[in-house]
């Protein structure tokens, strides 16, 4: 750090001396001036800046001022960079949003003072060994939003002082711990939005100094127990928008210094006993926007002595928080519970938090009865956030009133149990041989007890277990290895001294029966742009589950294999981040078991890129030199699937989609599908990958057509 401080001091002095020289020799189409600049360690300085952003450049200006400290070249058409050794004082170079296809095309030379390098949003596909030589002091490397599918083990050799590495939004399908052996000082690692199939134990072992790890939008379904081993100083980790069905508690025990944990937007159904326990330094926990979360069970958060904030908001099914869900949280100050399906928050929950200062409970369907009575009794110092948005949803006589307007004397001290309708649907469909969990939770005073009644009339109490079912103490009923004999109505009964509430759910067990379909599979191109197109298809039946695509240059073999998965209800796909004026082939294959599948392909050529005003129309022949082939393979798979990078599902009802990302949904049951398992492929595999002809009727003119 002392060396960096000395370097910054020298640069500040050099900036004053060289500012006038830079202004006199500023390249055409660029701006040269002194600007504020912050180092990677947030140290402020005035830097001699040459701003050539969005200048229509296809190459670097010939005469850059020798005193340049910050060189901005964003949004141009630069494909190659020659040595910049004469820029001895440069500390930051921004080459983002250009036409760079290989890091080897950027020959920066020996730049001992370069601290930050931006190369995001280019066309880079791989990182070779020692890809950035002669940059001994580089601290930040941004290479996100490229097409990287391969990184050699020694790619980062020579970058031992690197602090921040952004590899997110690429096409990596695996993580190799050898990448990190040359990065002993790395503090921030961004890996999100890569189609990684799975993580492995010891993936991050060499990164002992890592402080922040982002694994967002990677379609992770689970975390190996030792995946985070070696991250002794990790303080923040994000699992945002993955496919985790449960809290990865074993993996989290490896990061004892963790302070900030983001589990937002994962399909976790329950926060179970011990999920967050003995995390001695955890300060903030995020469990927001979980579409399947039903309950936070007793002792789910236990012995978290430094936890100050819990965010559990916008969970549409979260209807129950156990009175003893939070135990030994002495410093918790903020509890965010708004926009859920909670009918109440138990008084015992609040009283178990001695340092609680504020609660957000608004935008919940509050039932104004004895359970919520404590809110109006003025016996708590807790402040309610947005109290004007806290309304009664039930009973009918109080509906629409502010909770604070209903006097506590109007509420009885004891009340009937109430089973939340959000936790238990009316019908559940399960495939034969699969398991299903039925979640039943109830508020009441006194606290209700729960049992289940099976279709055969058997009464199942908490802790009851057999080879077919198990009932958890919290009220969840697990049904194993479902057959048609287990189909029927299951009834949850919640009772206390006052009375009882009950709710039934019908369980349907489906057997797979192959059905013939008279309609062949057909793929259509619905829109074409310069860097994207949309395809749709008429599903001929089957379980849509895998998405594979590869780039095929004319006369070469397949490159860049990518894998993702799609559920059966997806019928349209938006392929993004493509090259302009380039022909592509898209193939959709529908498979099912027993073996059999159908396939259809369509060719499409992306439109010519619009030439911005002032830009040179020179792509060095790049766009017409390659032809890519994408094919979508739909195969039977069980469980959840992942999405790739570079596209998005289009307009799926009930779910939001984000640009340049993929999402996943549960697979539908096989009996819902109409598919002929004996249907033969209409063309041989060798016909799938002919050379695309932009002049052919299938791919020319920016349109699309079916292959012969």
Image: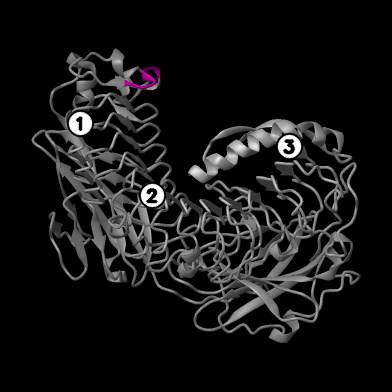
- In this rendered view, identify the residue nearer to me: 125 or 65: 65
| Rendered image quadrant of residue 547 | bottom right
Q: Residue at x 89, y 56 (%)?
A: 618
Image location of residue 342, percent across then percent down = 32, 35
Image location of residue 217, percent across then percent down = 51, 54
- Viewer-nearest of labels 1 and 3? 3
Q: Residue at x 54, y 71 (%)?
A: 153
Q: Quadrant of the C terminus?
A: bottom right
Q: Quick one: label 3, few (<14), some, or many (20+) residues within 10 Å?
A: many
Tag 2, which secondary structure? loop
Mark 1–mark 3 Cα distance, whole angstroms, equals: 53 Å
Mark 2–mark 3 Cα distance, whole angstroms, equals: 50 Å
* 118 w.r.t. 495: above or below: below
Question: For mark 1, what is the residue?
Answer: 353
Tag 1, which secondary structure? loop
Question: For mark 3, what is the residue?
Answer: 49
Question: For mark 2, what is the residue?
Answer: 292
For marks 1 and 3 on the same chain, the one whose residue lies earlier in the sequence: 3
For marks 2 and 1 on the same chain, the one whose residue lies earlier in the sequence: 2
Say whether residue 467 is magenta. Answer: no
| Rendered image quadrant of residue 517 | bottom right
- Viewer-nearest of labels 2 and 1? 1
In this picture, residue 59 sits left or right of residue 570: right
In this picture, residue 605 sits left or right of residue 469: right
Q: How many marks?
A: 3
Q: Which residues are magenta?
A: 384-388
């Amino acid at each position: 750090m002392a060396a960096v401080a000395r370097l910054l001091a020298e640069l500040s002095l050099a900036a004053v001396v060289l500012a006038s020289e830079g202004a006199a020799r500023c390249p055409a189409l660029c701006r040269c001036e002194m600007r504020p600049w912050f180092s990677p360690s947030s140290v402020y300085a005035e830097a001699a800046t040459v701003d050539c952003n969005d200048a229509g450049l296809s190459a670097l200006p010939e005469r850059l001022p020798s005193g340049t400290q910050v060189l901005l070249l964003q949004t141009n058409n630069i494909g190659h960079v020659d040595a910049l050794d004469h820029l001895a004082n440069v500390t930051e170079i921004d080459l983002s949003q250009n036409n760079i296809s290989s890091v080897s095309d950027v020959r920066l030379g020996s730049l001992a003072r370069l601290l930050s390098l931006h190369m995001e949003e280019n066309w880079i596909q791989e990182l070779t060994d020692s890809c950035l030589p002669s940059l001994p002091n580089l601290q930040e490397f941004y290479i996100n939003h490229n097409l990287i599918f391969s990184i050699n083990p020694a790619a980062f050799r020579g970058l031992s002082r690197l602090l921040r590495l952004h590899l997110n939004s690429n096409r990596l399908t695996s993580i190799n711990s050898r990448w990190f052996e040359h990065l002993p000082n790395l503090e921030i690692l961004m890996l999100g939005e890569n189609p990684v199939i799975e993580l492995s134990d010891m993936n991050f072992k060499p990164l002992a100094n890592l402080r922040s790890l982002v694994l967002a939008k990677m379609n992770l379904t689970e975390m190996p127990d030792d995946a985070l081993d070696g991250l002794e100083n990790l303080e923040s980790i994000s699992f945002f928008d993955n496919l985790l069905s449960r809290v990865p508690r074993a993996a989290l025990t490896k990061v004892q210094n963790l302070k900030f944990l983001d589990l937002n937007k994962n399909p976790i159904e329950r926060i179970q006993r011990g999920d967050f326990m003995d995390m001695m330094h955890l300060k903030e926990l995020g469990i927001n926007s979980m579409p399947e979360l039903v309950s936070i069970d007793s002792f789910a958060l236990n012995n978290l002595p430094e936890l100050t904030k819990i965010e559990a908001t916008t969970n549409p099914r979260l209807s129950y928080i156990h009175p003893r869900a939070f135990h030994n949280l002495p410093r918790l100050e903020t509890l965010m519970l708004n926009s859920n399906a909670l009918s109440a928050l138990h008084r015992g929950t609040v009283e178990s938090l001695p340092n609680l200062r504020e609660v957000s409970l608004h935008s919940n369907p509050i039932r104004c009865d004895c359970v919520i009575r404590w809110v109006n009794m003025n016996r708590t110092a807790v402040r309610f956030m947005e109290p004007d948005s806290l309304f009664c949803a039930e009973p009918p006589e109080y509906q629409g009133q502010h909770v604070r307007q209903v006097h506590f004397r109007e509420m009885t001290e004891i009340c009937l149990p109430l089973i939340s309708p959000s936790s238990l649907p009316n019908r559940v469909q399960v495939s034969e041989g699969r398991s299903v969990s039925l979640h039943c939770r109830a508020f009441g005073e006194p606290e209700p007890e729960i049992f289940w009644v099976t279709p055969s009339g058997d009464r199942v109490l908490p802790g009851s277990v057999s080879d077919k079912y198990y009932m958890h103490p919290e009220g969840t009923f697990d049904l194993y290895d479902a057959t048609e004999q287990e189909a029927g109505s299951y009834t949850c009964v919640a009772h206390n001294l006052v009375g009882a509430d009950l709710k039934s759910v019908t369980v349907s067990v489906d057997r797979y029966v192959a059905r013939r379909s008279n309609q062949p599979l057909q793929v259509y191109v619905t829109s074409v742009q310069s860097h994207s197109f949309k395809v749709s298809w008429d599903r001929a039946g089957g379980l849509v589950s895998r998405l594979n695509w590869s780039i095929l240059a004319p006369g070469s073999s397949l490159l860049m294999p990518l894998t993702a998965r799609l559920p059966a209800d997806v019928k349209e796909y938006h392929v993004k981040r493509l090259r302009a004026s380039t022909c592509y082939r898209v193939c959709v294959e529908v498979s099912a078991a027993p073996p059999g599948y159908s396939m259809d392909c369509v060719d499409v050529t992306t439109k010519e890129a619009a030439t911005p005003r002032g830009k040179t129309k020179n792509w060095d022949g790049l766009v017409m030199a390659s032809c890519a082939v994408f094919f979508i393979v739909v195969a039977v798979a069980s469980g959840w699937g992942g999405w790739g990078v570079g596209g998005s599902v289009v307009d799926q009802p009930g779910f939001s989609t984000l640009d340049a990302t993929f999402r996943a949904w549960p697979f539908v049951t096989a009996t819902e599908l109409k598919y002929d398992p004996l249907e033969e492929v209409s063309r041989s595999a060798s016909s799938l990958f002919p050379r695309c002809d932009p002049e052919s009727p299938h791919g020319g003119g920016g349109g699309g057509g079916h292959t012969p």
